[in-house]
């Protein structure tokens, strides 16, 4: 084999790994967990059941919704580390609307999203106006809104019939219709709608194409007449919007607002969005890739639990698999729009 043929073969292998590596990882995990959880009594896999598949989709729904918000920030070559804090603030605020103030569902949800857009306003000012690097600015906003959530909730959980700081009992209850949003099929339907919206927005509207252009080369985009600052601001507003929707869904799912519950979704969402770069060789932030990344993370956690892997060893395996998936993302050096 000549040197040129060896180089070509190496490139072909690299392209295959970059394009199909994440999908291959998911298939290997799927097969491993299917046979690793095989029941001799029933002659079938406990992993490969309809109820467990729904469990996985339900488990990844909130992560996916929050990660979709991050996908918009990544599309403009940004990084929004405040998504977890935004989701937490939305979780706390929407619950207080019900429990403390007895406000109806529609007004509570709209008011929560609008209030959470203050995160986008601060991010936009720091990043666009003061030219602070995205990651540093969003990190400071993350700490800020973690404190806002704790201060607003007086450092405690928000539950029905709770005793407030002034000694009085909270008058409101969480509506059953709101709780239904956190259960299947509605939570899964909301996730699917969010993914489809992001997919069509980024791929089939001029605004989505402009955001990719800004992320690819802001100077060229500016020279082409694209208002770079405007689309960076739009990306952070979309990021905050979907993070707040994720926080609202979290409140609907658990029926309470626990301290720092939303913060736990930060790293899984970041992993999902970055893994999405490698799905089908996209090389950029994309909605379906983010969804696939979230499913990979959710499937891994679900399968490890079913295989009775000790909780203290679970993060080792999760971290190793995610590292492999991310290595595939960057294997060819073609990845774009990454800080």
Image (cartoon, helix red, strand yellow):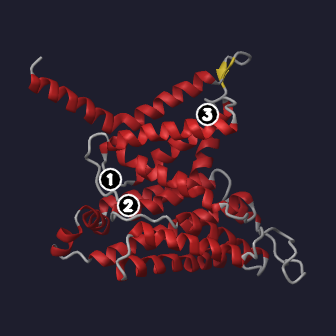
CB-based contact (under 8 Å), mark 1 and mark 2: yes
> Which residue has dot 1 on it?
284
- The N terminus: image quadrant: top left
- Does 317 appear above or below 39? below
> Relative to residue 315, is residue 224 drawn left or right?
left
Q: Position of residue 29 (x, y in %)?
A: 51, 30
Q: Which mark is residue 303?
A: 3
The local crowd at label 1, few if under 14, some if 14 to 19, many if 20 or more residues have their Cα within 10 Å, is many
Residue 276: % across, % down: 40, 48
- Seen at 48% across and 54% down, the residue is 270
- Label 2 sits on a secondary structure element that is helix
Mark 1 and 3 residues: CB-CB less than 8 Å, in contact?
Answer: no
Q: Front-most of 218 and 189?
A: 218
Q: State the residue in front, 339 or 164.
A: 339
Circle nearer the N terminus (1, 2): 2
Instruction: Look at the image and tell me in which quarter the C terminus lies.
Output: bottom left
Q: CA gap, disc 2 to disc 3?
A: 29 Å
Which mark sits nearer the N-terminus, 1 or 3?
Answer: 1
In the rendered view, tell whether residue 101 sits above or below residue 204: below
Q: Quadrant of residue 113?
A: bottom right
Residue at (50, 68) in percent of width and height: 139
Relative placement, left or right, of 283 versus 191 is left
Asked whether residue 45 appears in the rendered view, the answer is yes
- Which mark identifies residue 74? 2
């Amino acid at each position: 084999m000549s040197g040129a043929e060896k180089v070509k073969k190496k490139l072909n292998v690299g392209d295959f790994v970059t394009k199909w590596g994440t999908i291959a990882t998911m298939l290997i995990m799927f097969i491993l967990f299917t046979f690793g959880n095989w029941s001799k009594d029933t002659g079938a896999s406990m992993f490969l059941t309809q109820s467990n598949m729904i469990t996985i989709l339900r488990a990844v729904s909130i992560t996916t919704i929050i990660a979709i918000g991050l996908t918009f920030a990544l599309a403009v070559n940004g990084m929004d580390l405040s998504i977890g804090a935004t989701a937490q603030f939305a979780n706390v605020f929407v619950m207080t609307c019900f429990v403390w103030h007895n406000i109806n569902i529609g007004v509570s949800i709209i008011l929560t999203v609008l209030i959470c857009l203050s995160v986008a306003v601060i991010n936009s000012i720091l990043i666009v106006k003061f030219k602070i690097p995205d990651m540093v600015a969003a990190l400071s906003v993350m700490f800020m809104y973690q404190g806002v959530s704790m201060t607003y909730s007086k450092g405690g959980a928000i539950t029905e019939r709770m005793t407030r700081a002034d000694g009085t009992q909270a008058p409101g209850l969480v509506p059953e219709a709101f709780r239904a949003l956190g259960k299947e099929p509605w939570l899964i339907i909301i996730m699917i709608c969010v993914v489809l919206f992001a997919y069509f927005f980024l791929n089939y509207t001029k605004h989505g194409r402009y955001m990719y252009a800004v992320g690819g080369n802001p100077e060229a985009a500016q020279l082409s007449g694209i208002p770079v600052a405007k689309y960076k601001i739009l990306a952070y507003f979309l990021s905050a919007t979907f993070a707040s929707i994720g926080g609202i869904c979290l409140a609907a799912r658990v029926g309470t607002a626990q301290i720092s519950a939303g913060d736990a979704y930060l790293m899984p969402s970041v992993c999902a969005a970055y893994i999405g770069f490698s799905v089908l060789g996209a090389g950029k932030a994309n909605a379906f890739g983010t969804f696939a990344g979230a499913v990979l993370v959710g499937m891994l956690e679900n399968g490890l639990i079913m295989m009775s892997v000790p909780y203290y060893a679970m993060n080792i395996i999760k971290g190793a698999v995610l590292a492999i998936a991310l290595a595939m993302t960057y294997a060819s050096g073609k990845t774009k729009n990454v800080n």
